[in-house]
Amino acid sequence: MRERFWERFPLDELTEQEWEALCDGCGQCCLLKIQDEASGDIAVLKVACELLDIGSCRCGDYDNRFDKVADCIQLTPERVEDFRWLPRSCGYRRVYEGRKLARWHPLISGDSQRMHRKGISVQSFAVSQREVPEADLEEHIIAILPIDS
């Protein structure tokens, strides 16, 4: 990877490896979301995708995730502006918005576990989709994000 690529190149000029490295591994993009059809608002649940390994906050089958999870979200440089629900701490969002990566980000700290210790990842609160009946999903809403059209 190129040195400090996130500061030197626009998102659409990053290599695939560089793009993937922007992921801080927090797992927040793998939390289930429910969008209100009338308002467009997005409810974020503390329920994680069935493929997320909550302990590591990494996908358990990353290469096959789109085949196994029909609504798995693919973050790409071309679509990052559509993902306004990403947390402000997200490396992708920070770089897109012209902000610096957080000090705890693995590219800055060299430590992939730091965000877990700081409580930024879903590791301490998420539950697996396998453990929550679909009828009970709304009981697990942790945030409502207003989405302006």
Image (tube, helix red, strand yellow):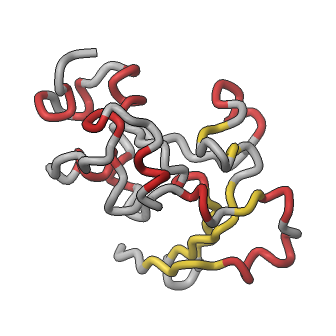
Number of labelled discs?
A: 0
Quick one: 114 or 13, which is closer to the camera?
114
Instruction: Tell me where residue 129 appears, x and y as whole percent.
Output: 78, 59
Instruction: Tell me where residue 73 appears, x and y as whole percent.
Output: 56, 46
The residue at 88%/69% (across/down) is 133
Q: Does 70 sit left or right of 43 as displayed?
A: right
> Given the current orientation, which residue lies at the most extreme top position?
1
Residue 38 found in image quarter:
bottom right
The residue at 46%/54% (across/down) is 117
Quick one: 102 or 99, which is closer to the camera?
102
Instruction: Tell me where residue 71 appears, x and y as whole percent.
Output: 67, 49
The residue at 21%/16% (across/down) is 2
Query: Which image quarter is the C terminus in?
Result: bottom left
Residue 37 found in image quarter:
bottom right
Instruction: Tell me where residue 101 appears, x and y as whole percent.
Output: 23, 46
Decide: is 82 above or below 52.
Answer: below
